[in-house]
Structures are given as C-alpha cells and as structure tokens.
Image (spheres, grey):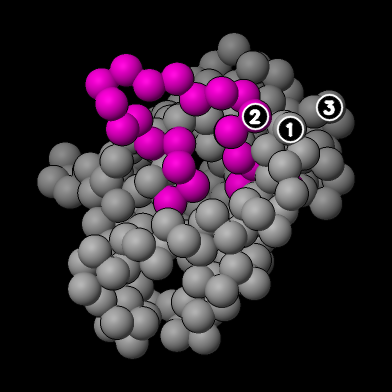
Amino acid sequence: MTKKVNITTDSGADARSISAALAARLKAHRKSRKLSLDELSRLAGVSKGMLVEIEKGEANPSIAILCKIAAALGVSVADIVNVASAPAVHVIDSKDIPTLWSGPAGGAARLLAGTSGPDMIELWRWEMQPGEVFESPGHPQGTFELFHVERGELSLRVGERQLSVTAGCSAVARTDAPHCYANQGEETLVFAMTVAELSQPR
C-alpha cells in the first residue's frame, strides 16, 4: 500500500496554501516543457484526473506519484516542493522544510534538501514509530539510496532481499525495484537517507 503525502511544515503552515503552491509549481514545470495534461499523463503513468486534481490543489498524491511526475518532467521532487538548491549556496529555513509522509502512529519523513533533476540528490530524515511501514513501487533505473540509522532498527526490504540495519550502522541499496522501510522494533526508529537518481546507471 502506497502511503499518501501529507505536505506540512514545522511552522504549521496552512495545508491549503501549501497545496496551492505545489499546484502552481507543477503547472509551471509542465507548461515550460509545453506538455498537455494528456501528454504528461502518458509520460508519467499517472491518470489525467489525478493531474487535474493536483493542479487544482485538491489532490493528496503519494510520494510515488510525485516521483513519477517529477521524472516525466525532468525535475526532482525537491524542485516540486521547492527545497532544491537554486543558487550555488542556498539555505532552507526550518519552517520551509516539508513533511512528505506521515505515519498512522505519528511517524514522519521530511525532505530536508535536494538538487534539481533529472540527475538529483535528496536528503531525508525519517522517524517511524513501532509497527509503521512505508512501501514504494521503485524509482527510475539507476536510483540508489544511502541510509544511516541514528536510533532503533530499520527493516529494509528491496525486491526479495531483507536487511536489518541497527543504530549506528549504514546501508546502501539500489532502489529501482520495489522496496519497503519498516519499524518492527519497540522503540522509535530514526534514520537519515540520501537518494541519488542517476540518468547514467552505474
């Protein structure tokens, strides 16, 4: 089951205004590439209806859907949520860092920073409460993720491979296959994650 995006910031900014900003950026990227909604739907593998709802600021898309749209537009998710590094040196204020996943028990994933696509790098911080799970159908070919667990134990599944990453340990995974993060322990799981999407797979 793909978890839904819950776009919020630490400042408690109004969700409606954040959705409106997201809608405007998506529309701007689509128009700059002279793509119709039908064309973007075909390229991204996302229904036209969903795209219309996003551009109207009325949708609650999953991280997977945002990834598909970003890849089709040749940008990164960081571009879409406005935490990409536009100038050479760029500070992102804490209040502008969005939470792109919220777990049913209070967990959260924040996209701390990222570069512009299509070759892009993203820096995330995840907190998962016991029993919480996040599943992804997989990213574009050539995507790698780097993990470092600060607290708890990360249960990481990529394809048929299952790994356990304990506090203080790190892991590397090629995530262009279906994958899953889970907290099967009894304490809060906290980990940092870097996503690198490369147009030239290594």
- Foreground: disc 3 or disc 1: 1
Disc 3 residue type (three-letter):
Glu
Picture mark count: 3
Q: Is residue 119 above or below residue 49?
A: above
For label 3, the crowd category at 10 Å Cα-Cα, with few meaning under 14, some 14 to 19 and many 20 or more, is some
Q: Which mark is residue 187?
A: 3
User: 56 left or right of 121?
Assistant: right
Q: 28 and 199: which one is in front? A: 28
Residue at 80% of width from left, 28% of height from top? 188
Residue at 21% of width from left, 73% of height from top? 34
Q: CA distance from mark 3 to mark 2?
A: 27 Å
Which numbered disc flags the more N-terminal residue, 3 or 1? 1
Q: Position of residue 120 (x, y in %)?
A: 29, 40
| Residue 146 placement: quadrant | top left
Which numbered disc flags the more N-terminal residue, 3 or 2? 2
Q: 148 and 194: which one is in front? A: 194
Q: Kindly indicate whether the residue at mark 2 contacts the one at mark 1 (C-beta within 8 angstroms).
A: yes
Read off the magenta span.
80-102
Q: Position of residue 5 (x, y in %)?
A: 63, 56
| Residue 3 placement: quadrant | bottom right
Q: CA distance from mark 3 to mark 1?
A: 26 Å
Q: CA distance from mark 1 to mark 2?
A: 5 Å
Q: Which mark is residue 11?
A: 1
Q: Is residue 61 visible?
A: yes
Task: Tell me the element at label 1.
Answer: loop
| Residue 54 placement: quadrant | bottom right
Task: Tell me the element at label 2.
Answer: helix
Which residue carries the number 2 mark? 95
Q: Is residue 137 above or below residue 163?
A: below
For the N terminus, the image quarter is bottom right
Disc 1 residue type (three-letter):
Ser
User: 166 left or right of 198?
Assistant: right
